[in-house]
Amino acid sequence: LAALSLHMGTRGEVTTARALLQDLFRQLDKLHSKGIVHRDIKPANLLVTPISLSPPYVRLLDLGACAELRNEFVNFVPTETILDPLYSPPEEYVLPTDTPEKPNRMLASRLWARERPDTFDTFSCGIILMQLAIPGLRNTKQLRQFRSELDKCGHNLTEWRRNYLRKPASTKSPKAHPQEFPLLDANEGAGWSLAEKLIRPKITKDSRNQDDNEHHHHHHHHDDIVEGGPPNPLGNLLSLFRNGKKENTNEDGSTKDGTKTPKKEKTTLMRLTASEALSHRFFEDLPSSEETARVAKARAERRA
């Protein structure tokens, strides 16, 4: 981070990391606003330029894996995935494998809102945040171990943190297992809060649980199999157009005999989008891009 701080022209390692992540989310937000998901966010695909130059300071590289998933569905095959296992989210596929390869625009729009495929990229940003905060995770072996531990914890970073900090001192090395996390602990743990909201399973508003994510690993849900035939390509996506009312229910959700039908609780625990991440308190009090560039440029001129 010290070298990165010098390269970018920012002051302090924590400020450097925050500025870098903020601009990364800004670039992703622009990409996602067009319905495009990068699908291969990792340090090797980021170009960081000095802040004294014109923004953006973080440029996204290797756009060959990008898929347009809100309008035309370009560069997308439902049963194929492009990922780096060290940075990709647990669901592995950007959309369920029973998604039609070329849905109409109405279905595509609903899929974007329901499945939140853009959070495929923000999970990767969470891993990058952890690498910036914990130097040992910049090592491939340590990062692979971290991903393995995350998997055992159900991708619950809070639980991982508990288990990780409980490790006996003899198993820790100062670099790989630091006792302090300045980037994550600053501002009353704002970094931990952001990381926990990025590194988590993708849970949508229809209350699908971890079991459903596990089904994605096996390519098809059990109820998508048509007896005596191939997997149903529409699968549970037909439910997007159902009004959800049963024949024996009234408009208010009560049954014909007057009793109320219990409502299934819906979780709101969802991975943050890039736009949502930018509103997180982790980025509070950061100067604007223009102000940061002005200060960095003046500092560079003084050094010259």
Image (spheres, rainbow, N blue to C red):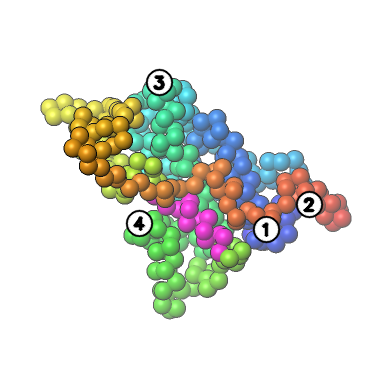
Mark with earlier residue (3, 1): 1
Mark with earlier residue (3, 4): 3
The one of 262 and 100 positioned closer to us in this rendering: 262
User: Predominant secondary structure in magenta?
Assistant: helix
Is residue 195 within the magenta segment? yes
Query: Which residue carries the number 3 mark?
Result: 104
Above-or-below relation of 134 to 202: below
What is the spatial separation of the Cα atoms under label 4 and label 1, in whole angstroms?
A: 31 Å
Front of the two marks 2 and 3: 3
Mark with earlier residue (2, 3): 3
Query: Which residue carries the number 2 mark?
Result: 296
Q: Residue visible at 30% across and 28% down? A: 242
Q: Residue visible at 57% across and 40% down? A: 28
Is residue 277 within the magenta segment? no
The type of residue carrying mark 2 is Ala
The one of 94 and 59 positioned closer to us in this rendering: 94
Q: Is residue 225 left or right of residue 90?
A: left
Q: Is residue 272 left or right of residue 290?
A: left
Marker disc for residue 30: none
Front of the two marks 3 and 4: 3
- The image quarter in which residue 238 lies: top left
Marker disc for residue 15: 1
Q: Residue visible at 48% across and 53% down? A: 197
Q: The residue tagged with tag 4: helix, strand or loop?
A: loop
Query: Which residue carries the number 4 mark?
Result: 154
Q: The residue tagged with tag 1: helix, strand or loop?
A: helix
What is the spatial separation of the Cα atoms under label 4 and label 2, in whole angstroms?
A: 42 Å
Start and end of the magenta stretch? 189-201
Above-or-below relation of 228 to 28: above
Q: Residues within 10 Å of mark 2 (few under 14, many from 20)?
A: many
